Image: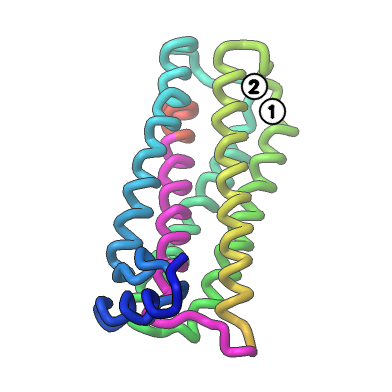
Amino acid sequence: MLGSNQTEAAAEWGNGYRQESPYIIDDAPPRAKRSAFFTITLASIMWWMPVVWVRFLFAPGVPEHGLNVFSWTVTTLLALIGVIPAVQLIRAARQGRYDNLAGKLVGMVAIALLVCAGILVGWSTSSLPIGTPLGSAFYFFSAALGVFFLISAFVETIHALRAGSSWGVGYDATSSWRVENSAYLWLWNCFWFLVFYVIFFLF
């Protein structure tokens, strides 16, 4: 942590954005922070790809059976509908419409909770044995999706509380990158839900 003199000097090196903390790295422009988070998010493909390949390595050519296709289809559609408020959120943050963030964040939290509820309904109405190669891959993948949507729901709740705060702690051009990053993680989750549906129900 920098001393007061160093903090003032660091602020002079900036690019017009105010610092949110006395760390020099926090003087990076929002675009750099978004890019850094996107790189970290993209790196998680190293975790997702083994989950995908388990389906093809341990249960190749095995069609789905004992699954409530209707329930899982509805849940997938809910996840894909969640793309709309996420894109709107990013657009509002980029255009400086910070007063519109809270409503979109609340909508995303609601969709995330519905997706998690849909996963629970899908589990309870399906009879695919978890002990089979297909069943173990299916339940593990869907559980991972539920965990990540719960994480997104928690993060978006925190952002919604800040964006809708009546104490003036909302977002501006300096801090809105946080909201954008959470939206990118949300879109990443929606993408993997689509992958999940394709490899288990369409193959």
Nearer to us in this view, 98 or 175 = 175
Q: Secondary structure at mark 1?
A: loop
The quadrant the C terminus occupies is top left
Give amino acid for label 1.
Ser
In this rendering, would 28 be left or right of 104?
left
Look at mark 2 in the image and give the residue it sits on: 66
Up-down relation of residue 160 to residue 184 (above or below): below
Up-down relation of residue 17 to residue 81 (above or below): below
- Density class for disc 2 (Cα within 10 Å; few <14, some 14-19, many ≥20) is few
Nearer to us in this view, 125 or 146 = 146
Look at mark 1 in the image and give the residue it sits on: 126
Outermost residue to the right:
124
- Density class for disc 1 (Cα within 10 Å; few <14, some 14-19, many ≥20) is some
Q: Earlier in the sequence, mark 1 or mark 2?
A: 2
Write the start and end of the magenta stretch as one range: 167-195
Give amino acid for label 2.
Gly
The prevailing secondary structure element of the residues shown in magenta is helix
Nearer to us in this view, 118 or 8 = 8
Q: Secondary structure at mark 2?
A: loop
In this rendering, would 106 be left or right of 197?
right
- Which residue occupies 48% across, 26% down? 200
Q: Quadrant of residue 198?
A: top left
Q: Is there any visible trace of residue 93 in the rendered image?
A: no
Percent x, y of residue 31:
28, 66
Please say whether residue 181 is one of the residues in the magenta stretch.
yes
- Which residue occupies 48% across, 80% down? 171
- Which residue occupies 31% across, 79% down? 9
Mark 1 and mark 2 in contact? Answer it, CB < 8 Å: yes
Percent x, y of residue 70:
60, 39
Q: How is the image coloured?
A: rainbow
